[in-house]
Amino acid sequence: MKNIYKNYLFEKHYLVSEGDADVIENQFETLFALANLFNIRIVKGEKLVHDYMIRFAAERLGENVPEPFYRGFPQTVRGLSPDQLLFDQMVHYSITYGFGNFSEAGHSLFEENFERTAFKENADIKDFNIITGEEAVTVLTELVQGLLSGTRPLSDEQYELVKSFIIEYDIKLQDIASKNTTVKLLLDTRDTRFADYIVLSDVIKLVDELNYREYGNKNIYKLNLKNQDRKFITSLINRFFSSGRCDIRTCFEKKKAWNGLLHHIHYKATTPEAQSFVDAMRGRENNSVFSDFERAMTDKNIKEAVDALKSGKGSAAVLRNMNYILSRCKAVEDMEYVVNCIDTRNVIVLIQLLMEYADYSKKNAARTFKFTKYNQLRVHKETPDEAKKRRSHITEGQAEMLAERIMKNLRAVLKNRLGKVYIDPDMKNYALPIQENTSQGGYGVLTRGSRIHIGEAKKLRAFTYWEKVNDIDLSVFGIDKNGECTEFSWRTMAGRQSDAITYSGDETSGFNGGSEYFDIDTEKFRKEYPDMRYLVFCDNVYSRVHFNKCLCKAGYMVRDTEDSGAVYEPKTVKSAFIIDSDSVFAYLFGVDLGTNDFIWLNMARDSSANVAGTTDMSFITDYFNVTDVINVASFFEMMATEVVDDMSEADVIVTDKNLEGAEKLSDAEIIRDYDFEKLIALMNK
């Protein structure tokens, strides 16, 4: 079985057994090694264990991690003065960037020899199942179908899994709900059967993706496609006209792009309908739904505008333009008419807008727009001039009313979807997978905004490490209640090292790669920096090589305050994931110092900033409170016919705990904190 499948199953707490179970040797020793080295407990399938699983787990959780600049981190770092720390940096930089010698990893000149006193460290147990290759295919089929049921774009890891599995196993596809996924499958396979899941207007989306992936061009109005790509696009357009999948009115929304594309590929219509389409795209009129909507809005005819939008695009489109419409309403009856139109059954749209309106207190201030393109986060902060010209204001009272109506609608849509459900109270800390396409994949990765309590007598050790010669920087930013940032990085830590926050030093060289760490003792940090509310961890490639061109891992450990002495301790790793985005900037995770919670971010940012401190961070706090609005627990409460306190009575069990005696619950469906695929399927049901 390919590693891409085994890696993904490892994230779901499965190990795959390959080979003859009757000739397996050293079973007890292997089980002991998995437990001793990684705190992995096999709860099912222990007779299928193989010794190669030790190596496999080590690769997933971290092995042969390069030493940091300060090899005695964190103890030896705290014993050095700011002058010594700064001198270490300057000498190291003069060797690397000054003389161009990157062959050897740099280390401190002043660090004293440090002898570690290693002892056993407390860490959470990781429950795993071992399954056969046949069982793995069955599990993967369910996972892939769940991913394909979602209308939102997939992350790079999820898409690669879906693509590889569809090609290798030729599964019967129930649906491909995401146009983004379909477009990528079409481009990668050139298999036109996938065109049955999209329509004519989606050709522009396909060309935009092709233009970026194959030609590195983000401007769809400046095409220079190869002849084979032009022929492929032409064949797709003709296929849509042959099959009748032509939504010509929607094509008017991208009329300029269509006009340029048809000219560029020298398209010649093969049917009268196709010729009418070509003439329409080249003509002066724009007959899109949004043109009718805007004409009615210009005429101040709110009801006609809403009717045009609802009949042409659905209730979800009315919801997405709610601020614009309500801000133009002058009469109460117009406002009531608009609000009565928000009857969509689209769960994703309802959840997205619930989050928008549930926290509207600061929306009249300068806004920060966050959107994704090519699976990377893009950010634009409203300028003072833009804010001054903005007219789409609604009041906080209107926002509260909308949030209430949306929640009421959501409850009605989800009501009684499931039977009896047991919900672990801690599931209120986990966010729903609404927009995870900018995320990186790996063990322990959770949905954006999910929270994990750090615990007492514990510290957080964030890490990043890489192979080959690359200069990757791990940094931390403290954000106060006013959104002001304090930087903790290679640029500032010479004067900020302490027991509260300790940095392992800036490693810039070494043919075998390097590593960087931050230790955060949250209790001491709160005392030293009382104004800080949040911490945000970032990775940047200073050498400007994109992450997908260098193997870089990041993650975190939860360590005892008095730890084992090992800098990198695999058994304490809560998450380890590969950053492979086509950028030099990634947000990793955060800490809520008020609640002592770890918060997942995991976003690749479309940015050329190789130093994180040169960008605005204030918008990040929007992700820190998403579970207050809606979370996994409240989502299942809405769907349950009855919420039960006894697992044995439940049809569905929702938990993040290791279940003792889970075999007795074989009739119940168990949904974990990492079961994104099941959550996606339920949200798109």
Image (tube, rainbow, N blue to C red):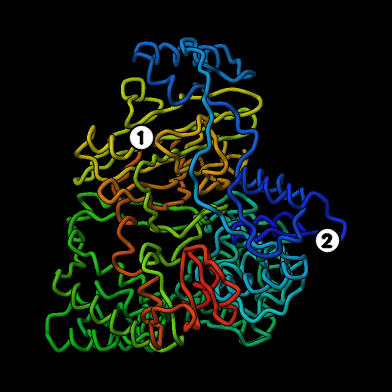
Rendered location of residue 347, percent (x, y): 41, 79
Between 113 and 5, the residue placed more toward the observer is 113
Amino acid, disc 1: Gly
Q: What count of labels does the image hold?
A: 2
Rendered location of residue 240, percent (x, y): 64, 81
Side of 321 where 385 appears, left or right: left
Residue 349 bears which disc, if any? none
Where is residue 510, by image quadrant?
A: top right
Q: Residue at x 41, y 74 (%)?
A: 423
The residue labelled by disc 1 is: 613
**Is label 1 in a helix, a strand or a loop?**
helix
Mark 1 closeness class: few <14, some 14–19, many ≥20 residues within 10 Å: some
Rendered location of residue 157, percent (x, y): 60, 57
Measured in 3D between alpha carbons, the distance from the residue under mark 1 to the one under mark 2, in whole angstroms, is: 53 Å
Rendered location of residue 181, percent (x, y): 59, 68
Name above or below for residue 617 compared with residue 497. below
* Residue 285 in sight in this render: no
